[in-house]
Image: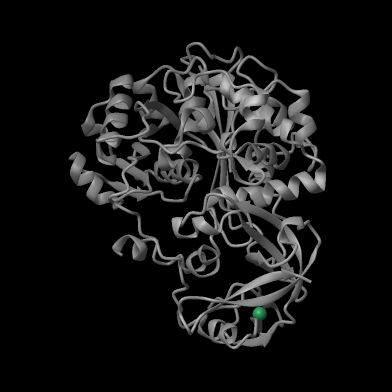
């Protein structure tokens, strides 16, 4: 149905800068950029270190653990394709590596989430075999 | 920085409506025509044009061609909700530099989804936000509001006071889309959108346009005897952008306020037109501007009357929360209302002593933080 394709769930449009991130996620690994010049770890992936402006960025594997910084229950998603999944628990997680990440909380007990809860990354299948989405579960 | 000789000389506002057959260009033209007629300025006197829009066509020379304007300066001031204040800053720079003597700045939107605005560079939103079923600005503000409530004990009733006061301000503003009184019960029981953000926390998208006219002091004197000066202005773009764990409850307005109040004392401001996409955004800006300590905003709005006849008048025409948000006209709505007040033309909601106004603009949702663009200005009526 044309209607269904028009409101498909959004998938990332992979670009040269964040290709390693998505390849890592597909393999069940959460990758972050780390600057080879100053050591800064950053998220989301960018072409440059936001601290020292260096261009030599390595990829490190995050531990995949963190804490809930803030959350909201999305009842009106911007993309209507997500409507049948509402309310969606949209979260800000501070990873133990010291970066903030926006994602979704899924799994058991998420309706009782509160600030400071410990979480662990999980990788959710999508309609594309090459793409898995990093999401979080209560630890 | 203190401005030397730049004045606001006129303004125009179109009618606001939920849906509109007219294109954004027609709304622009209507707002500009009204501004020109109010001050008796001929079209040929326009030397500079700035547009601020979320809708196509958004190419400033194209708009000038459509409107038949031959110009010496153009700008597409597309900086989200801060676009109004930031356009004023850039036009004032051009006037002070002597490039032009008069500029028309306009913002607006037509609620027409047939011409979607493309943002091709915004891949972080597509790849790291939208894929999770994000709820847009409502969800971003919800994340900030929850943090503020948990950290500082801010209550929904305190936030409701802002929405309710602004609604009272809108009762005598014919432009406002919402002109029926709002009770605390109405506010607290409105439909949940993205917890804890409810329907009456959110602005209403609509069609319309706002326009302000800026001129050199010399030119201004030839146009009007109601001289309103741009005293000072400042902006901060991407505050804390390199911090990987930013403080989401403080906006760049903190830095903007520090700069503005080097030139004019906090206590000398008579009215506040604070960019309001959500009550929590107004409350945080009151804190960031230093009218109370961080975290005390809830108690501050309990202790003050925010209506046009109160001791701390905020968004005296109802703000976007009650007037509606015609796209990036939102960044101009606050400037136009300040101008109305300072010229003594705010019929039915005129602040008694209106000599000095502070206007802010905030916009552009960035990743994991709060707002990418923040700006403010102070304007003053002089004889
Ligand atoms: Zn670096």
Give the total of numbered labels. Answer: 0
Q: The N terminus of chain A is located in which quarter?
A: bottom left
Residue B69 visible from this viewpoint? no
Q: Position of residue A101 (x, y in %)?
A: 66, 68
Quarter of the figure that contains the C terminus of chain A: bottom right
The quarter of the picture showing ligand 1: bottom right
Residue at 68% of width from left, 25% of height from top? B268
A137 over B341 or under it: above or below: below
Name the foreground residue: A50 vs A24.
A24
Question: Is A69 located above or below residue B318 in the figure?
Answer: below
Relative placement, left or right, of B354 versus B152 is: left
Picture quadrant of residue A45: bottom right
Q: Position of residue B367 (x, y in %)?
A: 59, 62
Model colouring: one colour
Please provide percent x and percent y for residue B17.
36, 30
**Closest to the observer: B237 or B14?**
B14
Specify whether A45 is left or right of A2: right
Left or right, A46 with reference to A14: right
């Amino acid at each position: 149905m044309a209607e269904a394709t028009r409101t498909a769930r959004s998938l990332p449009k992979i670009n040269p800068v964040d290709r390693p991130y998505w390849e890592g996620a597909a393999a069940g690994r959460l990758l972050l950029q780390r600057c080879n010049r100053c050591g800064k770890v950053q998220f989301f992936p960018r072409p440059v270190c936001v601290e020292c402006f260096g261009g030599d960025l390595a990829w490190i594997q995050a531990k995949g653990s963190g804490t809930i910084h803030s959350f909201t229950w999305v009842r009106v998603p911007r993309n209507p394709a997500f409507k049948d999944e509402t309310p969606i628990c949209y979260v800000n997680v501070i990873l133990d590596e010291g970066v903030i990440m926006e994602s979704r909380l899924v799994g058991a007990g998420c309706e009782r989430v509160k600030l400071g809860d410990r979480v662990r990354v999980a990788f959710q299948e999508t309609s594309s075999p090459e793409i898995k989405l990093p999401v979080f579960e209560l630890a | 920085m203190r401005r030397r000789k730049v004045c606001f000389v006129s303004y125009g506002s179109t009618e606001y409506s939920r849906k509109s057959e007219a294109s954004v260009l027609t709304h622009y033209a209507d707002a500009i025509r009204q501004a020109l007629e109010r001050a008796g300025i001929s079209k040929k006197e326009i030397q500079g044009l700035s547009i601020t829009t979320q809708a196509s066509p958004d190419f400033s020379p194209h708009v000038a061609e459509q409107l038949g304007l031959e110009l010496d300066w153009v700008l597409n001031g597309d900086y989200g909700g801060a676009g109004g204040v930031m356009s004023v800053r850039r036009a004032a720079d051009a006037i002070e530099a002597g490039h032009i003597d008069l500029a028309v700045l306009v913002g607006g939107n037509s609620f027409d989804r047939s011409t979607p605005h493309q943002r091709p560079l915004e891949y972080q939103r597509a790849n790291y936000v939208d894929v999770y079923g994000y709820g847009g600005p409502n969800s971003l503000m919800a994340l900030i509001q929850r943090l503020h409530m948990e950290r500082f004990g801010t209550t929904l009733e305190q936030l409701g006071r802002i929405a309710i006061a602004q609604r009272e301000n809108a009762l005598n503003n014919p432009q406002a889309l919402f002109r029926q009184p709002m009770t605390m019960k109405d506010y607290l029981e409105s439909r949940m959108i993205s917890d804890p953000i409810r329907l009456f926390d959110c602005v209403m998208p609509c069609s319309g346009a706002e326009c302000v006219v800026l001129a050199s002091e010399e030119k201004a004197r030839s146009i009007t005897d109601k001289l309103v000066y741009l005293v000072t202005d400042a902006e901060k773009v991407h505050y804390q952008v390199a911090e990987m764990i930013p403080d989401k409850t403080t906006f760049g307005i903190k830095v903007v306020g520090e700069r503005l109040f080097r030139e004019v004392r906090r206590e000398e401001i008579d009215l506040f037109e604070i960019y309001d996409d959500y009550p929590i955004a107004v409350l945080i800006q009151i804190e960031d501007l230093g009218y109370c300590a961080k975290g005390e905003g809830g108690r501050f709005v309990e202790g003050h009357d925010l209506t046009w006849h109160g001791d701390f008048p905020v968004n005296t025409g109802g703000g976007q929360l009650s007037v509606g948000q015609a796209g990036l006209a939102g960044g101009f709505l606050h400037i136009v209302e300040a101008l109305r007040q300072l010229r003594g033309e705010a019929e039915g909601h005129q602040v008694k002593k209106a000599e000095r106004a502070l206007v802010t603009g905030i916009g552009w949702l960035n990743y994991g933080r709060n707002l990418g663009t923040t700006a403010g200005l102070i304007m003053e009526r002089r004889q």
